Image (spheres, helix red, strand yellow):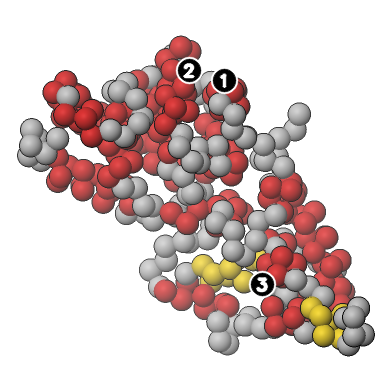
Amino acid sequence: LTVKWEEADEKIEDLLEELNRTGYNFNRDFILKTCLTLLDKGAAYNVNKFRDKNTREKIINEWEAISKSIKFVKDFLWENTYIRSSKALPSYLTLIPLIYFRYHYKKKWDEAINLDDYILRTLISGAFSGTPDNLIDKCTKNINSNEDFIVKDIYGVIRADGRNLEVSKETILKQSYTSKNIHLYFNLWYKDFDYRPSAKDNSPQIDHIFPQVALKSVKVPNPETGRMNLLKYKAYDRNQIANCMLLKQSENGSGGKADQLPEEWFEEKPDAYLKKHLIPTNKELWKLENFEEFIEERKKLIEEKFSYLILKE
């Protein structure tokens, strides 16, 4: 491509710089795979495709339209889903069918509905994980058949490919401190949180509401010895999403929450703060001895928060 198009490197780098300026991490492979898909060459990344003269010439001649379509969908992602960080975008490939639709059926875009639901549901369910080249091709075939992006039809294509689209409350509640997708959920939860602040102290950090050190102090008797030396709350109990919230680094560090228990940290917090973090307002639940009851109540609030994503058959 660069042999026949001297500006190729510069054009691609300029596009990537523009795409990633707001916190994403698009790369060259994504751009080139998208080019192949838009030109109906198939999503599979194969260098021989770029040796084809017609393909190269189409990329060169269509670069302006291709790059505009990619940037348009990136802007849609930013403005309509609140996914504004690479941490919250586990798969970029889910965007390619949308870019294809925008490129080929630009006039239909404003009439299409539920495009944001498509993005969120495919990301959370991991529908485009693994090797989705064939799935991308099937989606573009469906778009061409309908001359439109009909979300329920695309969902049918994804399910027919043997991929999951279900988002249940269990899917959400099993997220934990170490889950790769937890920032995706938090990005949707804390829609006004700046994931790329100018000041480092404003960077987001996942915090344990009931501190690990406090939960590790709670012991139960060892059935073999009778000694109180077994942890009552295992790693999953401590790290589950229902015991996590998002704080600024300055809030969470020294002089901030640190290892304070909820009954201390939330005591003087206004109702708006509790509502933002989905904290049960019953102060009795903020005590260490009521950790399990707190978790059950917060799970209900989290389920309600994400109810719009949970499939209802």
Front-lying residue, 230 or 307: 230
Whether residue 187 is visible here, answered yes or no, is no
Label 1 crowd bin: few (<14), some (14–19), many (20+), radius 10 Å: some
- Residue 267 position, x and y percent, is 75, 79
Label 2 sits on a secondary structure element that is: helix
Residue 312 left/right relative to 1: right
Residue at position x 20%, y 47% in the image: 14
Q: Are dots 2 and 1 in contact, CB under 8 Å?
A: yes
The circle on residue 153 is: 1
Mark with earlier residue (2, 1): 2
Residue type at mark 2 is: Asn
Residue at position x 32%, y 21% in the image: 40
Relative to 41, say whether 263 is above or below: below
The circle on residue 208 is: 3
According to the image, label 2 marks what residue?
142
Q: Residue furthest front?
A: 224
For marks 2 and 3, give the CA distance: 44 Å
Label 3 sits on a secondary structure element that is: strand
